[in-house]
Image: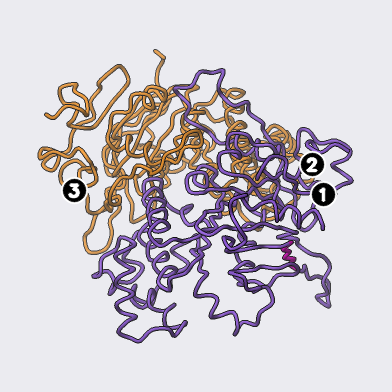
Chain colours: A purple, B orange
Amino acid sequence: MTMIERNLESSNLDNRTDKDILVEVKNLKKYFPIKGGILKRTIGQVKAVDGVSFSIIKGETLGVVGESGSGKSTLGRVILRLLDPTEGNVVFDDVDISYLSQRKIRPQRKDMQIVFQDPFASLNSKMSVGQLVEEPLIVQGLLSKKDRVKQVSEIITKVGLRKGDLQKYPHEFSGGQRQRISIARALVVNPKFVICDEPVSALDVSIQAQVLNLMKDLQEELGLTYLFIAHDLSVVKHISDRVAVMYLGRFVELASKKALYNNALHPYTRALLSSIPVIDIDKEPAKKVEKIKLQGDLPSPANPPSGCTFRTRCPYAYDRCTSEVPELIELEENHFVACHLYTEK
Amino acid sequence: MSMQPLLDVEQLKTYFYLNQNQVAKAVDGISFSVFPGETVALVGESGSGKSITALSIMQLINKPGKIIEGSITMNNQELLKLKPKQMTSIRGNDIGMIFQEPMTALNPVFTIGNQITEIIRKHKKVNRRVAEIRAVSLLKVVGIPRPEEIMKEYPHQLSGGMRQRVMIAMAISCDPQLLIADEPTTALDVTIQAQILDLMVEMQEKFQMALLLITHDLGVVYEYTDRVMVMYGGQIVEQAPTKQLLKLTRHPYTQGLLASLPKIDEDVDRLGTIKGTVPPAYNFPIGCRFATRCPFVMDKCKESNPELKELDTGHFVRCYLYEDGGSTNDDD
């Protein structure tokens, strides 16, 4: 049994059985070729997702945080098979969908949906809201015209819009309302699992709060499972049950929300947490978190550092980090970290 | 701070004349001062008029927009009466500006070195050799590794954080007294954001500049600024020293903004929200501009717009709830 498999097994909470797992990702990799030269031969690879394993339990929200270029969006897209994996498996509801043909995967898509970041780019401006929300039902071919209309008007009130809005076009709505349309579009087919790819990062804070509350309410009402991808740690904290931190295509830490935000182990997570400006006006100075300021930028994923990919920015890096890739190990119960600082040799 | 203000904006109005005789009152009667060496935040959501305020100070407003009223003085010199050529020398020399998106603010077809030396030569009347030496030292100051090589590179070869460092180098290249930064870190990741904000504060201290920081992030405001102005609907609704504003938040809009922030250091089940959306600038309500979204709205609020009143020293609020110095708990 490899380290990864062992980790996977132990990642399920003790009182939960395999039946509770909705999505299982095993050693997933997605490499993009870099073409170059006159003959456009492959001269290198961008390892956007480089060996990620985890499972998502029914009804929970798993948050994935990372900076731009960390591979978090690619991960979401590979899980939904909007991109094909290079290696590894995605098991959704006991079906391995990683290498199914596009035709065979379409019925599965009814159960897995996505809400994209930019509600200005993800809605076709020439379609009315009614058409936009009905489209997924037509593609799935599940309902009669009459039932479709009923379903559409049901979902549109659920996301907080009015039935009168169905005749309008996307440009007549503000950003927050457009994101509500995107959510309606994702939920109209009654999915079990929704990937939310930075759904609120284009919105103002007061609108962001409205949309986050809506997503929480819908999750409770419809029993949804979320994979919530974002760069904003406070947003992820607010909505997630468990949180994974991604850096250059790998998970560096995975833990329950409480453990991750109160007792972060990986130096990168700690740096991320301490670089958020916090309004801690009531706190005594002694209680304030010590700041770890990172030097430099995220290295290019086309040419990542050897060993631990974080070592170039890590204040605690030592010789072992250069030569050896740290595995994601379960250091405390359900608290996984990939860092040599915590493993004795 | 008993000294003379560096920048003084009085009753500034910038309107945009749209089709169908609609007038967008993007900035509608704003007054404030910035003192030497001070860091002032201008906070608001999109459409509140904070960027247009900055662009008005720089006089970079294009048609259909126009500064229709008010005065902007810098060191007691009225900027709105200057000829375009005189204003060009103020921009860069006296006021530097950093924009949100460094990729669109930099010219993609010129090298970094080219773009920095152009500014230095334009304002300082020095030859190319001298300008290049100054450019390299500026890049070094803003923490760019291998500055000699970066001089020969193009913007697309740099990361977002590096580009923003270049923008800062350009903005401070002629020792301005005032630096205006319009959402300088919004496009950046959080670890890079911390680097850039620290750098700006360092530069501010080193070159003794005043900083007008435009942002929507109240966390950034708390950690980096002395005083804060909250904008809503083209007007300032609350203004106070930063700590005071966050401790004793008075305006219902500011209170709503703070409640809707997900907090990293505490758990809340549901976030507070402000109902509805910002009214468009061509169609503000007649009374208080926040009346349509305000949880404490009264009849009076729908009839006339309250004045910005000083409640405590330096703490200004535009709200009828405080007419008699009362609090939000009072029924009257």
Residue type, mark 2 in image? Arg
Residue sitting at x 81%, y 36%:
A317
Q: How many tags in the picture? A: 3
Label 1 neighbour load within 10 Å: few <14, some 14-19, many 20+: some
Does A54 appear in magenta?
Answer: no
Q: Nearer the viewer, mark 3 or mark 2?
A: 2
Whichever of labels 2 and 1 marks the residue nearer the N terminus, that label is 1
**Along the horizontal axis of the image, is A343 left or right of A57?**
right
Majority SS type along the magenta span: strand
Secondary structure of the residue carrying tag 1 is: loop
Marks 2 and 1, Cα distance to the nearest angstrom? 8 Å
Q: Quadrant of the C terminus of chain B?
A: top left
Are the two marked residues, 3 and 1, in contact with CB atoms closer than 8 angstroms?
Answer: no
Residue B197: give x, y in percent of width and height. 58, 34
Residue type, mark 1 in image? Pro
Tell me the magenta residue range. Answer: A27-32
| Residue hosting label 1 | A305
| Residue hosting label 3 | B285
Residue B280: give x, y in percent of width and height. 28, 53
| Residue hosting label 2 | A311
Relative to B267, say whether A26 is above or below: below
User: Looking at the rendering, which quadrant does residue A96 occupy?
Assistant: bottom right
Marks 3 and 2, Cα distance to the nearest angstrom? 55 Å
Judging from the image, mark 2 belongs to the subunit labelled A
Check chain identity for marks 2 and 1: say if they share one.
yes
Marks 3 and 1, Cα distance to the nearest angstrom? 57 Å
Secondary structure of the residue carrying tag 2 is: loop
Does A30 appear in magenta?
Answer: yes
Q: Nearer the viewer, mark 3 or mark 1?
A: 1
